[in-house]
Image: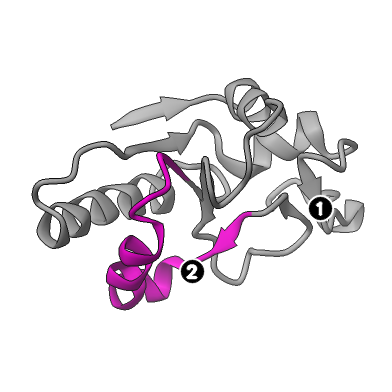
Amino acid sequence: MKWINGDELAGIMKTEGKEAKKDFLVVDVRDDDFIGGNIVGAKNEPSNEFLTSVDALVKETKDVPLVIFHCALSQVRGPKAARIYEEAKKKLYPDEDKQEVAVLRDGFTQFQVKYKDDPKLVENYDAEVWKNEYH
């Protein structure tokens, strides 16, 4: 499984001519912690429902060259969702291998620390949510 850091994702998102949901898709698998902001254009697919929604997501995104998963820290939910997605993709489209699947290292928690003030990268930001050090 490929890992990318926040700077790499920011670079992809800001590349002239690259479009979210066409050239890349960010999949945020946070559950009730999907508050306080998100990556611009990210699709929220809660991890607690992921097993039942993964086949539909694979079908919907099969032509997107890069799919990037993350959760709050990308330690458990993000990598697990990426693995489940890859397995479902192989089952549904065994002859397709053009798509790259990646996980955002350190998740949204670290991404928002660096990019919270950039409206091209983070939307719906709420500073109050991030004042709690345990978020």
Q: Name the residue under label 2.
A: 46
Dividing the picture into quadrants, the one containing residue 34 is: bottom right
Query: Which stretch did the figure color magenta?
Result: 42-68
The residue that label 1 is drawn on is: 123
Q: Which amino acid type corresponds to the residue marked 2 in the rendered image?
A: Pro
Cα–Cα span, label 1 and label 2: 18 Å
Residue 87 left/right relative to 32:
left
Q: Which residue is drawn at 61% across and 47% down?
A: 20
Q: Nearer the viewer, residue 96 or 58?
A: 96
- Residue 62 circle label: none
Residue 44 in magenta stretch = yes
Residue lying at the far front of the rendered structure: 17
Closer to the N terminus: mark 1 or mark 2?
2
Q: Identify residue type, mark 1.
A: Glu
> From what the image shows, is residue 104 above or below residue 61?
above
- Quadrant in the picture for residue 44: bottom right
Residue 120 part of the magenta segment: no
Q: Quadrant of the N terminus?
A: top left
- Residue 122: % across, % down: 78, 45
Q: Nearer the viewer's eye, disc 1 or disc 2?
A: 1
- In the figure, is residue 33 to the left or right of 49? right
Name the residue: 33% across, 54% down: 62
From the top left corner, tell me how far across and down residue 35 is, in percent: 73, 64
